[in-house]
Amino acid sequence: MAEIVLHKGQSDIIKYLFAEPNTVKYATVMASRGFGKSYLAASAAALAVGELMQMPANMPNKNVSLICPTYQQACDIYFPLLAYEMGLDYYASKHSLASGTFWFPNNVKLKLWSYEASERMRGSGQYFVVCDEVEDWVGKPGLKESWESIIQPTMTTRWPGNHKALIIGTPKGFTYFYDLTNLNTVDERWKHFHYTYKDSPYLSDEEIERVKRTIDPLKFKREYEANPEESGARVFYTFNRKSHIDPSLPYFSRDDSSRRYEDVHIAIDFNIGIMAAVVFAVRAGQVHILEDIQNVLDTESLARKIKERYLDKGHKVYAYPDPAGRARKTSAVAGTTDFSILESYGIRTIARSAAPPIIDSVNAVNRKFLNAAGDIDMLVHPNAAATIKSLERTVWMENNINTAQISKAEGVEHWTDALRYAIEYLFPVRASTKATSSGFMF
């Protein structure tokens, strides 16, 4: 095999994947253009082949796969890089450009795949998989379905405890790839690597300055700083994990001796099959989002869960639902509404007489996360996972904030819809908006 020469960033990733002990390792790499992602991917695949060739010939499932967005990319980029630049054609028993496959002694195989053909990997056993430029895996089944239902099972079922994967991409917002890059915070088998143009020895200062003059700032941040946060379409652009997620936020206080129980506030968005609720405390003018409620199908089930979790433990509960729920029967029997169901359980429901303009409610949330003076007055506990995802991924329709329409394409907006109703009511941008309460006067 030809000598593989890596720069420091590439070398750090390879060391993580291939240094002993050889237990399960998943590496995610969010890197800028010019980092050398293709060379890194090919090097990792070649090293995995070398590991397998040292194992007994009769060991099954000695497969390495490299998956690209398209088969044309796999053949045009990786076949010559692997075969000729890295010299795998010399070590292979045979190889075929037509099938994108290298066969090696000891029953080892390296295959190039297109994302579109990843369905055909079902049932195979994979020792090592490289997923390249995953943000370009567009169309069905999608990165999430491919990884969870196809790719990862090919490793876990045939190489349990001894497989590994390299997942590479340049970010395009808060997508499923972004979710994968955060798994290192909850699973020690995962490690995330992030590199900007400054980490690449292949890009000169002169070239970077030329690029800065030819593309817009948002695109530069995504492509050359590998920054997933920079998206002009994001609705809640003032929210970010570093500033607003706080695992030390205390839960709702309760003192049984004095019968003092902290009030619970719940923002609610009514949907058929998806009842989204954001649960928070109001403390000295700050909003502390402590958890959210998911996987509830109807208003009755939501009200029952709220009663069991908070009311039965002595807390007063104030709910801020979608004002349309005053008349709408999302999942109720004749003669009842979403509001009346909540009220029947002792939940104090509060809402505007009509929904405020979207821009006003969005501005209220953004201002609470960060105002012009630099004040942060809303924090989120990691337990509110659905809310965090919604804050990061909710975008404007058609990438144009002037439409003032929130995209429903990904189905993540329900929790931020709920939050908008509550925050706009409690901390309105426009003080003149008429407010009403329902069920209780207080």
Image (cartoon, helix red, strand yellow):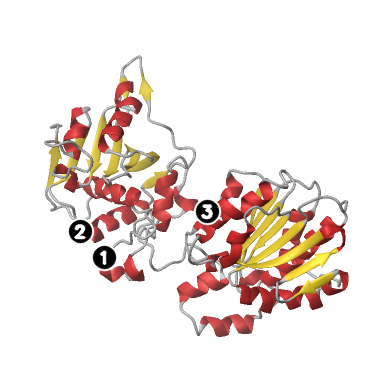
Q: Could you tell me if residue 178 is visible in this image? A: no
- Could you say where residue 417 lies in the image, as x and y percent from the top left? 29, 51
Q: Which residue is mark 2?
A: 357
Question: For the residue labelled by badge 1, is the local secondary structure a helix, a strand or a loop?
Answer: loop
Q: Which residue is mark 3?
A: 179
Q: Is residue 326 left or right of residue 25?
A: left
Question: For the residue labelled by badge 3, is the local secondary structure a helix, a strand or a loop?
Answer: helix
Q: Is residue 425 left or right of residue 384?
A: left
Label annotation for residue 335: none
Label annotation for residue 404: 1
Nearer the observer: mark 3 or 2; the answer is: 3
Could you say which quadrant of the image residue 102 lies in? bottom right
Observer-nearest of 360 and 142: 142
Observer-nearest of 324 and 76: 76
Q: Earlier in the sequence, mark 3 or mark 1?
A: 3
Q: Are marks 1 and 2 in contact (CB under 8 Å)?
A: yes
Q: How dense is the environment of label 2, judged by Cα within 10 Å: few (below 14), some, or many (20 and up)? A: few
